[in-house]
Image (cartoon, rainbow, N blue to C red):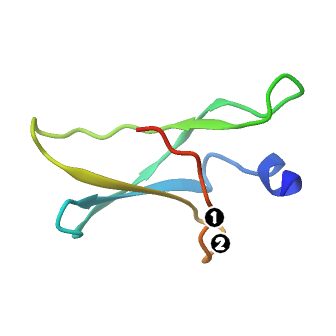
Amino acid sequence: MSSLQENIDSKDIVVDVLKSDGSFVEKISTSLVLGKDNQNDFTAFEYSIWADLGEDFIFVPHDSRYCSIILFDYCP
């Protein structure tokens, strides 16, 4: 697993945005915020979306290189 984390690029991590009813809104690109190094054991990415007040969304981050599900610690 460590080799997978070391090779993650921000262009590979995308976030699918869905409305609360499950309909697709858009796919968002991410930007690298904090890379994995000797000081920490994680990599952090950020993304943003414009929304109207009160809109409900479901955010689904995933690695676009793989069809299978890869788990992320996710904090909106």
Q: How many numbered tags mark residues here? A: 2
Q: Position of residue 73 (x, y in %)?
A: 58, 46
Residues under numbered marks 1 and 2 in contact, where contact means CB atoms less than 8 Å apart: yes
User: Dividing the image into 4 quarters, which one contains the C terminus?
Assistant: top left
Badge nearest the viewer, 1 or 2: 1
**Element on which disc 1 rests:** loop
Q: Residue furthest bottom?
A: 67
Q: Position of residue 6 (x, y in %)?
A: 83, 47
Q: Residue furthest top?
A: 39
**Element on which disc 2 rests:** loop
Using the image as rendered, state which of residue 27 and residue 71 is in the foreground.
71
Residue at x-position 66% and y-position 68%: 65
Using the image as rendered, state which of residue 16 and residue 58 is in the foreground.
58
- Write down the residue under mark 2: 66
- Three-letter amino acid code at the position of disc 2: Tyr
Task: Answer with the quarter of the image where residue 70 lies.
Answer: bottom right
For disc 1, the neighbor class at 10 Å (few under 14, some 14 to 19, many from 20) is few
- Three-letter amino acid code at the position of disc 1: Ile
Question: Could you tell me how far apart the alpha carbons at marks 1 and 2 are, in whole angstroms?
Answer: 8 Å
For disc 2, the neighbor class at 10 Å (few under 14, some 14 to 19, many from 20) is few
Q: Is residue 71 above or below residue 43?
A: below
11 with respect to 36 (left or right): left
User: Dividing the image into 4 quarters, which one contains the N terminus?
Assistant: bottom right
The disc label shown at residue 20, or none? none
Residue at x-position 86% and y-position 51%: 2
- Write down the residue under mark 1: 70
Q: Position of residue 62 (x, y in %)?
A: 54, 60
61 with respect to 66 (left or right): left
